[in-house]
């Protein structure tokens, strides 16, 4: 029996791809539901909702996914080669290619390798078009191979995205979001991270084999060598169906994501489509606060914010101290992904932080301090600008930046030379530009003494390398008689969790988060030990704080235990050890230190002196869209589309927080939250 000839490729491919996408969507949901990270505490109705809405969301998105295939299908016709139209089309496309490559690359604004990829793809298409235009005999075989390749690409992408969603969920407890968008932009680090973390060769090989098998099943018993658009009537019919399908699908996705959420965050994430989440994140990295969030009258917000922050009518906070300033050296260490629950004091039984555990006993410790976000840039923003997190992307990442009034600039007025020391490339996450605009000099891995680097992976050098470089610079500043302020950002406690050999003993997977935490702790211990032998040690204050927790996943969008981080001041003979139980934020650390040093200054800081008798206990925390304010045992969450939720918080045994949705509105706390976030989001660049 001869093979069935396929004349209309899109009508053949679309339903098969739809079936593949729906099957994979179902499998992903099942896998994520039974993932160890997922907390399942919902009833039968939510189960139905997850799979019913999940099916509809997948159907809706698959229409959008088929648009590139339809464009490819449109150009399968040989009509485009007919003269004179064919020559005109070829000439215009060739001129466009030359213009983009040599004169104006429209992808330059995205940075990274994207411009090179776009140029290479455009040049390849132009060459292919030229060959097919002037060598007609190759068109049939070329078309057959192209169809196979497109089908293979679709199958590979479907499998790769499915696998990536599981990996992303394992890391962050959510579907794709802004983090995934960032990872797409910073391709070099991300691809290197994947290569170092996973057996990528075997994974790619397996993906290609599975994708090839899927494509073989699709075309089994079929002859696609004469496939094209069939007829223009069928093309128009396909266009009409796809247009209606994609339009209705886009509307449903946009409306449903805002009106059909579940009370459990995991359930909401499971019913969504990960690819649509990615597109939404890509399009909304900055949110118009006035358009998306519940507001109070502007004059009331400004007055309340100034009152709570102790600011004058111009929005400035003037701090005066009658005592003379104490110009101690300052070393601020923001530790990558160090959740409080890794430390023994906060419940850990693993014993992976012996150096930090010992350091706590000699330090002033802020037990109830919370991170402002779930990304490094949030932590950097908080300790540098001392303001609550903004909606959308962190100020660190925003391209339009002027000079910021930062902790570094205040210290500059006292003779310090602020520096930001980072073992990776400071261009990542726009850190270099941000810190330069805050008055810091930048020291990143390209400035390190290369022959002395102990270890490096795709993200950068190991923590001990950064500490070694820091000590070299501290020695120079001490000899010059200059007080130094250095902000050190660590790297090692980040996937792929690799570090120098023979530093620690760990009974388990050496490339695990906990093993990396143990190395990070070892490096801090060595740094403090090395520093203690230096003449400047007794004149130095060490501030150690996490940039954020290892995970932000929970039953609610802002689970408090996933923002609880360790923070301490260590300065033997100067700062008395002790434990502070006040609820506070990363934004309060540097103002508190400035108070201990008796600095007088003028700023726009929202951060306060935690040790002051009148300190108002509160903490700020945020995802990219949800803005949290924790005060008076109430967590207020402001979300887009002017949604507001409040939770009564009960701290249970240890450091676990139970959040129960409030039965009534806590008006005073809500107004404070709105005032803080409304002003910070309407006055910052």
Image (cartoon, rainbow, N blue to C red):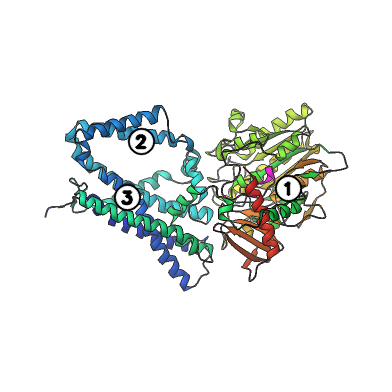
Relative vertical location of residue 389 with respect to residue 94 in this rendering, above or below: below
- Disc number placed over residue 359 in the picture, else none: none
* Majority SS type along the magenta span: loop
User: Which residue is denoted by mark 1 in the rendering?
Assistant: 589
The residues colored magenta run 382-401
Mark 1 closeness class: few <14, some 14–19, many ≥20 residues within 10 Å = many
Q: What secondary structure is marked by label 2? A: helix
* For the residues bearing labels 1 and 2, Cβ distance under 8 angstroms: no
Check if mark 2's residue and mark 3's residue have beta carbons within 8 Å.
Answer: no
Q: Position of residue 116 (x, y in %)?
A: 42, 33
Q: Which mark is residue 121?
A: 2
The answer to which quarter of the image holds residue 429 is: top right
Left/right of residue 412 with respect to residue 446 in the rendered view: right
User: Magenta stretch containing residue 357, yes or no?
Assistant: no
- The x and y percentages for residue 674 are 65, 57
Q: Is residue 392 magenta?
A: yes
> Seen in the image, is 305 located left or right of residue 262?
right
CA distance for labels 3 and 1: 52 Å
Q: Which residue is found at the position 32% from the left and 50% from the top?
A: 211
- Callout in the foreground (2, 3): 2
The answer to whether one can see residue 586 in this image is yes
Query: The N terminus appears in which quarter of the rendering?
Result: bottom left
Please tell me which of labels 3 and 1 falls first in the chain: 3
Mark 3 crowd level (few <14, some 14–19, many ≥20, 10 Å Cα)? many
Residue depicted at x 70% and y 39%: 405
Residue depth check, mark 3 versus mark 1: number of the one nearer the observer? 1
Task: Tell me which numbered mark, 1 or 2, is placed earlier along the sequence.
Answer: 2
Precedes in sequence: disc 2 or disc 3 = 2
**Residue at the spot of label 3:** 211
Q: Residue furthest left?
A: 1
Real-space Cα separation, disc 2 to disc 3, in angstroms: 22 Å
């Amino acid at each position: 029996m001869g093979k069935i000839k396929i004349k209309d490729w899109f009508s053949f491919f679309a339903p098969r791809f739809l079936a593949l996408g729906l099957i994979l969507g179902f499998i992903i949901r099942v896998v994520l539901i039974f993932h160890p990270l997922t907390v399942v505490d919902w009833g039968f109705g939510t189960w139905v909702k997850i799979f019913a809405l999940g099916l509809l969301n997948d159907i809706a998105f698959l229409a959008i996914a088929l648009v590139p295939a339809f464009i490819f299908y449109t150009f399968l016709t040989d009509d485009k080669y007919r003269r004179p139209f064919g020559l005109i089309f070829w000439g215009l496309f060739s001129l466009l290619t030359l213009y983009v490559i040599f004169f104006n690359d429209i992808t330059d604004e995205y940075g990274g390798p994207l411009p090179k990829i776009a140029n290479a793809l455009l040049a390849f298409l132009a060459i292919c078009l030229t060959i097919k235009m002037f060598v007609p005999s190759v068109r049939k075989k070329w078309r057959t191979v192209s169809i196979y390749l497109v089908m293979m690409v679709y199958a590979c992408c479907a499998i790769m995205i499915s696998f990536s969603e599981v990996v992303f969920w394992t890391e962050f407890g959510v579907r794709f979001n802004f983090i995934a968008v960032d990872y797409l932009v910073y391709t070099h680090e991300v691809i290197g991270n994947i290569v170092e973390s996973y057996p990528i060769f075997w994974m790619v090989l397996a993906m290609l084999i599975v994708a090839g098998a899927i494509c073989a099943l699709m075309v089994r018993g079929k002859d696609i060598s004469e496939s094209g658009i069939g007829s223009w009537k069928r093309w128009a019919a396909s266009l009409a169906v796809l247009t209606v399908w994609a339009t209705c699908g886009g509307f449903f996705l946009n409306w449903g994501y805002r009106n059909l959420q579940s009370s459990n965050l995991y359930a909401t994430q499971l019913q969504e489509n990960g690819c649509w989440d990615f597109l939404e994140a890509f399009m909304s990295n900055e949110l118009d606060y006035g358009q998306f969030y519940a507001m109070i009258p502007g004059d009331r917000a400004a007055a309340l914010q100034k009152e709570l922050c102790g600011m004058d009518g111009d929005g400035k906070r003037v701090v005066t101290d009658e005592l003379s300033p104490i110009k101690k050296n300052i070393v601020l260490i923001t530790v990558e992904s160090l959740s409080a629950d890794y430390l023994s004091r906060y419940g850990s039984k693993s014993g992976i932080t012996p150096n930090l555990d010992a350091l706590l006993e000699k330090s002033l410790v802020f037990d109830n301090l919370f991170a402002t976000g779930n990304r490094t840039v949030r932590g950097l923003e908080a300790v540098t600008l001392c303001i609550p997190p903004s909606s959308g992307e962190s100020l660190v990442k925003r391209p339009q930046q002027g000079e910021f009034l930062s902790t570094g600039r205040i210290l500059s007025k006292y003779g310090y030379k602020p520096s930001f020391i980072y073992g990776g490339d400071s261009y990542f996450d726009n850190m270099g530009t941000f810190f330069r605009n805050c008055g810091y000099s930048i020291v990143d891995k390209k400035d390190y003494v290369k022959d002395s680097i102990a270890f490096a992976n795709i993200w950068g050098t190991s923590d001990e390398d950064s500490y070694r470089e820091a000590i070299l610079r501290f020695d120079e500043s001490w000899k010059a008689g200059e007080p130094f302020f250095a902000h050190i950002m660590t790297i090692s406690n980040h996937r792929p969790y690799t570090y120098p050999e023979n530093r620690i003993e760990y009974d388990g997977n050496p490339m695990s988060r906990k093993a990396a935490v143990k190395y990070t702790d070892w490096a801090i211990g060595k740094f403090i030990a090395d520093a203690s032998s230096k003449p400047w040690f007794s004149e130095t204050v060490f501030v150690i704080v996490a940039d954020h927790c290892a995970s932000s996943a929970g039953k609610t969008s802002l689970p408090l235990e996933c923002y609880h981080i360790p923070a301490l001041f260590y300065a033997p003979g100067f700062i008395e050890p002790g434990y502070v139980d006040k609820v506070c934020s990363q934004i309060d650390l540097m103002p508190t230190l400035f108070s201990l040093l008796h600095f007088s200054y003028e700023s726009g800081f929202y951060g306060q002196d935690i040790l002051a008798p009148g300190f108002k206990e509160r903490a700020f925390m945020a995802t990219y869209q949800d803005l949290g304010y924790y005060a008076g045992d109430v967590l207020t969450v402001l979300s887009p589309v002017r949604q507001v939720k409040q939770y009564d918080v009960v701290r249970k045994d240890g450091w676990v927080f139970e959040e129960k949705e409030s039965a009534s509105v806590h008006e005073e706390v809500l107004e404070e939250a709105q005032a803080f976030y409304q002003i910070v989001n309407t006055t910052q660049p």
